[in-house]
């Protein structure tokens, strides 16, 4: 059993990179492109709608650092915030690391600013962020910056992907979180595929007018982010925590290859469920299979002897 414990540790790291086609979503078998997106839309759209007060990182636990420190992940900065003591409201700030906000990574102005809609409190795209960095981000589209106007050493604001002058700023997160944001946007474009994400602000830079379908510039960029920054243990833990709160999952964290089948280089190929992730057991020098399954809304990894672990490494009872 000891060798399998080591194997499981490795599986957490390499499952995403391998992008194995596990049967997490068997209803997608044989589907292609937009058919896959439609099935996922119907599967995840009817989730529990949370109150705005219940989406603070202090309440959800979705962004806890996995070290028992009571601090949270901030994907806009390198600030370290206590999840209970460092909350603050919206507004501008002149100081780094003063306090953290609840940030809509897909800006609410893009759907018109309505707060009486599920998107407003959807935890999959609500993240805690430094108030100054949040203020700088404003509602600018996420992209890559070539001419920097502001930076906190982690994120950048300036001109790049979405314009080189005037009112055409781009906000660039750190490389280690680019895949996270791409998969958040893939989720939003799927869970709310019937919405208009160009109703205000700069949403038209990312989505085709009147739709939740990506423009080519944004799609190609986010696919590259997705490929270059595979799913992390942090994302898996966050996906599990959000699912526990609102009852739906981000399928692009569970099965990263789905992005390729919907928008990428496999969109004309029928999706086929596989048998598990191939992982090398370094103790035995053998290759074994680690199967991923979703049961009761939770993701489990099953070893060859039938032992189950949660996606964060805990033995499942």
Image: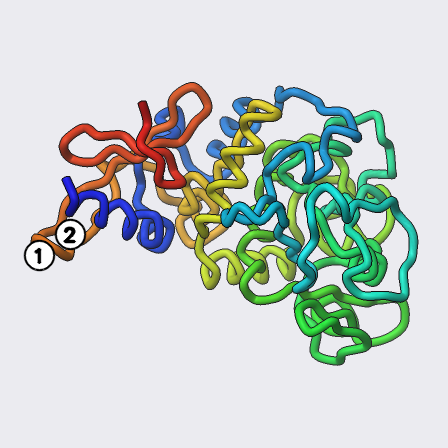
In the foreground, 117 or 55:
55
In the image, is 25 to the left or to the right of 188? left
From the top left corner, tell me how far across and down residue 174 is, in percent: 61, 66
What residue lies at 83% left-to-right and 61% top-to-bottom?
Answer: 132
From the top left corner, tell me how far across and down residue 259 is, in percent: 48, 46
Across the whole image, how many numbered discs are drawn on residues? 2
From the top left corner, tell me how far across and down residue 136 is, in percent: 83, 63
From the top left corner, tell me how far across and down residue 272 is, in percent: 30, 36
What residue lies at 25% left-to-right and 35% top-to-bottom?
Answer: 291
In the image, is 86 to the left or to the right of 175? right
**Whole-number angstrom distance, CA of label 1 to CA of label 2:** 6 Å
Q: Is residue 307 above or below residue 139?
A: above
In the rendered image, is residue 30 in sight? no
What residue lies at 79% left-to-right and 47% top-to-bottom?
Answer: 101
In the foreground, 11 or 69:
69
Secondary structure beneath disc 1? loop
Q: Is residue 32 above or below residue 154?
A: above
Looking at the image, do the residues carrying marks 1 and 2 touch, with CB atoms under 8 Å apart? Answer: yes
What is the number of the mark on residue 12? none
In this figure, which residue is indicated by the disc labeled 2?
281
Q: Quadrant of residue 56?
A: top right
In the image, is 9 to the left or to the right of 67? left
The quarter of the rendered structure image containing the C terminus is: top left
The quarter of the rendered structure image containing the N terminus is: top left
Q: Is residue 62 above or below residue 140?
A: above
What is the number of the mark on residue 285? 1
In the foreground, 308 or 171:
308
């Amino acid at each position: 059993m000891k060798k399998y414990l080591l194997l499981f540790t490795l599986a957490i790291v390499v499952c995403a990179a391998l992008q194995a086609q596990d049967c997490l979503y068997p209803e997608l078998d044989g589907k292609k492109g937009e058919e896959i997106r439609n099935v996922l839309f119907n599967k995840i759209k009817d989730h529990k709608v949370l109150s705005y007060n219940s989406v603070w990182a202090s309440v959800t636990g979705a962004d806890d650092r996995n070290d028992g420190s009571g601090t949270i992940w901030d994907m806009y900065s390198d600030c370290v915030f206590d999840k209970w003591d460092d909350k603050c409201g919206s507004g501008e700030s002149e100081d780094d690391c003063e306090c953290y906000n609840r940030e809509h990574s897909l800006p609410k102005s893009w759907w018109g600013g309505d707060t009486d809609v599920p998107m407003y409190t959807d935890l999959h795209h609500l993240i805690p962020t430094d108030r100054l960095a949040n203020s700088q981000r404003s509602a600018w589209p996420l992209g890559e910056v070539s001419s920097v106007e502001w930076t906190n050493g982690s994120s950048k604001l300036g001109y790049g992907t979405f314009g080189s002058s005037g009112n055409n700023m781009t906000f660039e997160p750190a490389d280690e979180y680019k895949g996270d944001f791409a998969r958040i946007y893939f989720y939003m474009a799927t869970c709310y595929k019937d919405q208009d994400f160009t109703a205000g602000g700069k949403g038209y830079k990312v989505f085709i007018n009147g739709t939740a379908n990506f423009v080519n510039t944004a799609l190609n960029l986010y696919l590259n982010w997705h490929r270059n920054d595979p799913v992390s243990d942090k994302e898996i833990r966050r996906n599990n925590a959000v699912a526990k709160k609102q009852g739906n999952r981000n399928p692009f964290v569970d099965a990263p290859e789905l992005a390729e089948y919907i928008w990428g280089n496999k969109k004309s190929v029928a999706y086929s469920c596989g048998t598990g992730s191939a992982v090398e057991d370094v103790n035995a020098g053998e290759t074994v299979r680690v199967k991923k399954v979703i049961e009761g809304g939770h993701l489990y990894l099953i070893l060859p002897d039938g032992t189950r672990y949660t996606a964060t490494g805990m033995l499942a009872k």
